Image: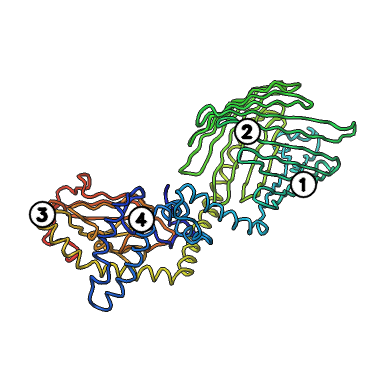
Amino acid sequence: MAAPRVEDEEHFLTTDFYSLLNVGREASTDEINNAFRQLSKIYHPDKHFSPNKKKMAEVMFTKIKKAHEVLNDKHKRTIYDIYGESGLETEGLEVISRTKSPAEIIAEYERLQREREERRLQQRTNPKGTVSIALNATDLFDRYGAEPDADYESDINIEISSMSIFQSVECPLTVKDTILIGGSLMTQNGNGDGTFVTTWRRLTSHKGWAEVEIAAGNNMNGSIKGFRQLSKRCYGTVVGSLQSTRRGIRPSIVSMLAYQFDRGLQGRMTFNASTPSSVTSVLSYDNEKNRAVFTIQLGVPNTFISASYCRKFLEDDAKLRVAIKFGTLGMIGEYGFEKKITQFSILGATMVVGLPVGVMLRIKLLRGNQTFNFPIYLSESLSPSAVFYGTVVPAAVYFVVKKLIVNPFLKQQKESEIERKRNEHAEKLLQRKREAQSAVELMSETVERIIDTEEKRNGLIIIKGLYGKLVEDTSEANDDGCIDVTIPLQATVKDSKLILPDNSTKSCVPGFYDPCIGEEKSLYIRYKFRNRIHQVTLLDNEPIRLPQQKHLVKDELPSTSMSYRS
């Protein structure tokens, strides 16, 4: 169980107790006690005699003492590992019996959290919406020319063939009960339609839920849906509905059974007993980078076989998808690309080519919980020019807009957010900086002794340590995003070794602080070991283990007395 990342937006100024004590997240009680004893030798107020240093030591000792108390108590540590420092401040936590097991502690804590959540339910909604606008642009590629002897040409018309809007909101009643209210409006070729939908959803147990839906519009519809986890690998759903039509009431029932064969391999079978009826089998494979789906449907009149493949580019927040479908009603091929363009926005474009649909471009924009669909009909036949321009033009427009509008906007937004955080938390940041400077001052005498010991054994001497937003010239620290951490690193050296575990950030290590909030940070270390120069640059969350042969700087010898004292 890992403690929450202190670099999260709401936690970037909290303290990481593991980093503060310089222990790993799997550290034993003995390791935690030993770390506390070592730090107490530096920060205990009785170790300092000047009033100023005593006052600074009291602040630092209070912090490491709190970290030691939490991590040395299995009950508090369990809560901290899951919910962070804020979990220790939960209202009602003090009534939890200390004789309970960690599992019971978690259950009790979650009960308290649920009670707090219930008090907030009435203030929470989850609005969702979908807007679809279909454009008919077939005149661009299927345009008929004027008669040979005519003195005019027909105009190119791009018209909106249909439009629909759907909006819904959630109204939580209790932890188990939720009411969804939604409505839709649609117009197509001059004809309009509208529907009002109300849904009641209840969590029946940890293995199932049920849902009742009523829709009112031109016709009345009602349905009941249920979900049940049948086993660890198997679950099923059943939907029964009644729909009023001009010919009377039309019932239908659809059931689905799913089985998880492996971690990424799942099979589903759907039985549709309504009119028209069908049986559909789906086999899907999904992992971190790939998704493949194979579908077979047997029905009247629609029987088909389809296959699709999606490649996920995690580092670019993008997806590439291709699909093909053959059936009694025709054949269709699709290829498309989807890209996350901002923190809350995803843009996608898909080309659809086939018979009898012709050529269509589907553009989709997701912004938060809102979805905007723009299907554009380009040609009623398989027009090569429609396929070419439907592929090239959206890609060219995307790259131009991204380069000229999106990238500058994101850069400005990031800079504004960083500046906002700095201004909003200026006092806390200044306090962190002062605490780090106090820690450095308090550990200076200890560092002197460590250096003397290491020099006698020709051991590990930290020549330069820089932390923050590093530039190419890493020779000096600066006030704009980079600080000198030579002394804090040397203070961590023990028996010619420097070890910092893989924790969320190094900004909580004694003597460190975050000089560039919201930006990526690195740590540069230049050190001497066995009279040879070494250096390494690490990411903020990478573990440190020095010395290492691969850090050796060849053909470079140290100058005399190279350490922080020089």
Q: Nearer the viewer, mark 4 or mark 3?
A: 4
Q: In terms of image quadrants, where is residue 122?
A: bottom right
What is the basis of the colouring in this image?
Answer: rainbow
Q: Nearer the viewer, mark 1 or mark 2?
A: 1
Judged left or right of residue 136, residue 247 is right
Q: Is residue 389 visible?
A: no
Q: Which residue is mark 3?
A: 457
Q: CA distance from mark 2 to mark 3?
A: 74 Å
Asked if disc 2 and disc 3 are in contact, CB closer than 8 Å, the reply is no
Quadrant of the frame with the C terminus: bottom left
Label 1, residues with CA under 10 Å away: few <14, some 14-19, many ≥20: some
Using the rendered view, name the quadrant where residue 222 is placed: top right
Q: Is residue 231 above or below residue 455?
A: above
Residue on which the image places disc 1: 198
- Which amino acid lies under the numbered mark 1 shown in the image of this protein? Thr
Ranked by sequence position, the earlier of labels 4 and 2 is: 4
x then y, percent, for residue 90: 51, 60
